[in-house]
Image (cartoon, grey):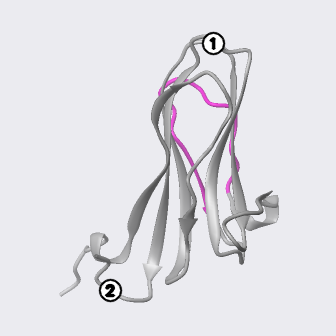
Amino acid sequence: MTTRDLKSNIDVQTSLGPNDYTASANGSSADLRGFESAVVAFIVGAVTDGTHTPSVEESDDDSTWSAVAAADLLGTLANLASNTNQRVGYRGAKRYVRAVLTVSGATIGVEAAAVVVRGNAAQRPVA
């Protein structure tokens, strides 16, 4: 019998907490040790004004960050649009990833959040 137990194989970490963003923000890091895959998802409510550009950064040491090369992302990200969630897969080799939101021209901004879904856990079930 096949089970559809995704819960035991993934972990979800908040990188950018739900907020009304009017300024650029770097998310909290997610440690990929013990996981073989990751997805970064941006969850979007209303975009009121400004331009809101999502991206993903990576790090070896959780201190020095750089943009993830397009070749290490599965999919692409576009400027945020109201009620339109986006996700990209990460296939790079760094230990840490985080969501980044670059904002310009916003006074009211965007309702948004971002999570990192870590998958294919080495130890299951994931606690």
Q: Quadrant of residue 77?
A: top right
| Vertical comparison of 58 with 15: above or below | below
In x, y percent, where is residue 41?
Answer: 52, 50
| Vertical comparison of 87 with 123: above or below | above
Residue found 28% across the figure and 70% down from its top = 7
Is residue 72 covered in magenta?
A: no
The quadrant of the rendering that contains the C terminus is: bottom left
Disc 1 marks which amino acid?
Asp
Residue found 71% across the figure and 63% down from its top = 63
| Vertical comparison of 21 with 60: above or below | above
In x, y percent, where is residue 72?
Answer: 75, 67
- Between 29 and 11, the residue placed more toward the observer is 29
In the picture, the disc for residue 124 is: 2
Furthest residue toward front:
63
Q: Main secondary structure of the magenta part?
A: loop
In x, y percent, where is residue 123?
Answer: 37, 89
Magenta segment boundaries in residue numbering: 75-89
Q: Which one is earlier in the sequence, the residue at label 2 or at label 1? A: 1
In the picture, the disc for residue 12 is: none
Disc 2 marks which amino acid?
Arg
Residue found 59% across the figure and 48% down from its top = 27
Residue found 72% across the figure and 67% down from its top = 59
Q: Secondary structure at mark 2?
A: loop
Q: Quadrant of residue 68?
A: bottom right
Q: Quadrant of residue 29?
A: bottom right
Residue corresponding to mark 1: 49
Task: Report the side of 71 relative to 57 (left or right).
Answer: right
Furthest residue toward left:
1
